[in-house]
Amino acid sequence: MTMKAAVLGDNGPEIRDMPVPEPGPTEVLVRVCAASLNRADLLIAAGGRHGFHSHSGQPIGLEWAGEVVSAGPDAGGYKPGDRVMCSGNGGFAEYAVADHRRCFPVPEGMEWTTATCYPVALRTMTDAVLINGRMKAGDAVMILGASSGVGLLGMQIAKRRGASLVIGTSTTEARRSRLAEFGADHAIDPTAEGWADKVLELTGGRGVDVIVDMLSGPYINDALSCTAYEGRIVNVGRLAGQMGEFNFDLHALRRIHYIGVTFRTRTVEDVAAINEVVQRDVWPDFEAGHYSLPIDRTMPLMQIREALDEMKANTHFGKIAVTPGN
């Protein structure tokens, strides 16, 4: 049995006929109903490695939702017919396999294109805001690069968990104007001169307790200057650059905890541990419908190249989804 799948070819992603994968003992085979794009997909589409996987000639796509077709004997109780949203490798296809520890059940009534937006964001922002950011009720939180799906969810998690102040940044006025819909008390342009002073003003000179940084590059020193003493900066992404000057004296002076995180080198056991925190601290609000993510556009799987180009152009707000049409 074959399927249509997006694979990394010699000249970038291309649609090919591929064998339908077989689930391993701890995996589920999922009929993909929708998949969504993440920034890491751009790295993979350009031929880069992502974590433990090399994707050349293999289906690509890190996030999808669909219906379980079959399950291994140790697949966490999932069974055919279950609705799941997954992360892993190979989601830009008609079928994909995922370890059960990389799956969440789809809440009743949730559409596929909505469900596919959440697996990566739920884990990433639970890990960044709550686990590594150690956010507690009353903390002030800032998301650097807040208009992505992951950033929008991070602001909502912070707000629902009792943050006293939530600041989101975006480089365009159109995006900043919408951040309040997703939990931001204030929206700031990080390219504007003196933006860190504005953060200090908003926090009464104290600075924010937690910064989730998805930009890096040239923004780090300003971020250091508006972090509270003994605050936490959690480096999730490097959209503005992987290299930059770092003010070590300012870092030490404010006794800042600077934490780098990624899922590229995490094991499924690591993911399972994060899932426990998601289920305990975030899932009840998620299942009750208190979180939302905008879908900027939905495109057919056959246009995966165009979808990736749209993400690279960085004109979208929220998520880009693709559907295989099966």
Image (tube, rainbow, N blue to C red):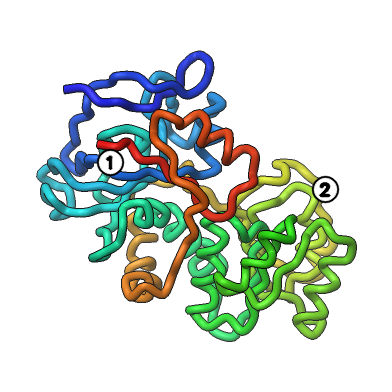
Location of residue 184 in the rendering, given as x and y in whole percent from the top left corner = 62, 73
The residue located at (23%, 65%) in the rendering is 108
Foreground disc of the pair 1, 2 = 1
Residue 26: x and y, percent?
Answer: 20, 43
Q: Where is mark 1, residue-wise?
A: 32
Q: Residue at x 16, y 39 (%)?
A: 25
Question: Is residue 137 positioned above or below 77 on the image?
Answer: below
Q: Which residue bears the numbered disc 2?
A: 245
Residue 171 at least partly seen: yes
Front residue (pair 171, 139) = 171
Q: Quadrant of the N terminus?
A: top left
Q: Is residue 119 left or right of residue 236?
A: left
The answer to whether residue 248 is seen in the rendering is no
Q: Is residue 27 placed above or below 94 in the rendered structure?
A: below
Give the residue at x 83% y 66%: 195
In the image: residue 62, left or right of residue 324: right
Amino acid carrying mark 2 in the image: Glu
Q: Is residue 39 left or right of residue 265?
A: right
Q: CA distance from mark 1 to mark 2?
A: 43 Å
